[in-house]
Structure formats: C-alpha cells, structure tokens
Image (cartoon, rainbow, N blue to C red):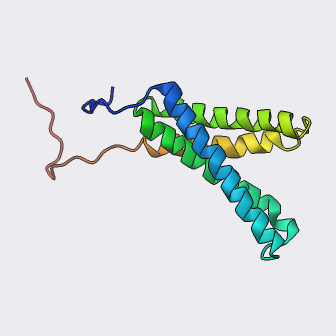
C-alpha cells in the first residue's frame, strides 16, 4: 500500500481497463481521421504516414494507460501494462476482423504501445518530496 487515504472513488480493474481501452481506441480513430485529412489536403506527403501512425499509436496508448491508472488508483505498473496489452490485443482483433489478418508491423506496434504504457508506469515511481526542510533524522531508542 502507498499509505494514501482511500477516498472510495477508485474504479474496479476491469472497468478501469475498459475505460482506458475505449479512450485509446477512440483517440486512435479520431487522430487517424485527422491524419487522413492532412494527407488528402496535401499538408503531409504520403511517405510521412508512418511517422504519423507512430505518433498516433504512442499518444493513444499513453493517454489510455494514464486514464486506466488514474481510474483504478492502485497497482500502477500492472494497470498501465495491462492497458497497453489490451489495446494491442484490440488492434490485432480489428486487423483480423476488417483487414483479413494481414499482420504486417504488429511487433513494431506492440513495441510502441509497450513504450507508451511503460512511460505511464514509470512516471509514478518517483519519490514524493518531504514537506520539511530539516534533514531526515532517525529516531533513536
């Protein structure tokens, strides 16, 4: 336990992961539409689509994991990585359903999602600052 007071506002793990996954998938769809619009208006060249997809996947996985972690409020590493794994599994399922199972680049996609989820997991590991300015003294017996 982290020693924080339980406010009773934490969500269950399945609900938190589902919420984060919905955010990730919705954001992926919206940002993909934006990328398609930029390419159709010739603001971006077709050769730059790979960079756009990299950014879309990273931002979507990052925000989805952050929403899941903030909703569940415990087990930060497990929730962040679980959110990324669920997002990747959903992308694989969508690929199988709509694109006939052409799994080109799924390893790279998984690594991008892993990096984003790992970033969220590691952001919460920093130590909290002490309130006092006096040096820490161990109480003797």
Q: Position of residue 17 (x, y in %)?
A: 55, 32
Q: Residue at x 27, y 48 (%)?
A: 129
Which residue is most to the top?
Answer: 141
Frontmost residue, 84 versus 141: 84
Q: Position of residue 135 (x, y in %)?
A: 17, 47
Q: Residue at x 78, y 35 (%)?
A: 92
Which residue is most to the left?
Answer: 141
Q: How many marks?
A: 0
Q: Residue at x 53, y 37 (%)?
A: 19
Q: Position of residue 36 (x, y in %)?
A: 78, 63
Frontmost residue, 58 versus 34: 34
The vertical placement of 61 against 1, above or below, is below
Frontmost residue, 104 versus 138: 104
Toward which corner of the image does residue 81 lie, by quadrant? top right
Frontmost residue, 133 versus 85: 85
Q: Using residue 81 as the reference point, say whether residue 95 is left or right of it.
A: right
The vertical placement of 64 against 92, above or below, is below
Q: Is residue 55 visible?
A: no
Q: Using residue 136 as the reference point, say whether residue 119 is left or right of it.
A: right
Q: Position of residue 56 (x, y in %)?
A: 69, 55
Q: Is residue 28 visible?
A: yes
Q: Residue at x 91, y 39 (%)?
A: 102
The vertical placement of 86 against 36, above or below, is above
Quadrant placement of the C terminus: top left
Q: Using residue 57 as the reference point, say whether residue 14 is left or right of it.
A: left
Quadrant placement of the N terminus: top left
């Amino acid at each position: 336990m982290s020693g924080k007071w339980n406010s009773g506002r934490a969500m269950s793990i399945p609900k938190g992961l589902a919420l984060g996954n919905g955010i990730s998938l919705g954001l992926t769809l919206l940002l993909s539409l934006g990328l398609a619009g930029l390419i159709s208006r010739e603001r971006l060249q077709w050769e730059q689509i790979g960079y756009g997809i990299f950014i879309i996947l990273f931002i979507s996985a990052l925000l989805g994991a952050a929403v899941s972690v903030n909703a569940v409020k415990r087990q930060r590493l497990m929730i962040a990585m679980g959110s990324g794994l669920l997002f990747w599994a959903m992308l694989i399922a969508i690929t199988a359903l709509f694109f006939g199972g052409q799994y080109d680049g799924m390893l790279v996609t998984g690594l991008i999602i892993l990096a984003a989820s790992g970033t969220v997991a590691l952001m919460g590991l920093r130590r909290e600052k002490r309130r006092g300015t006096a040096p820490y003294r161990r109480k003797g017996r």
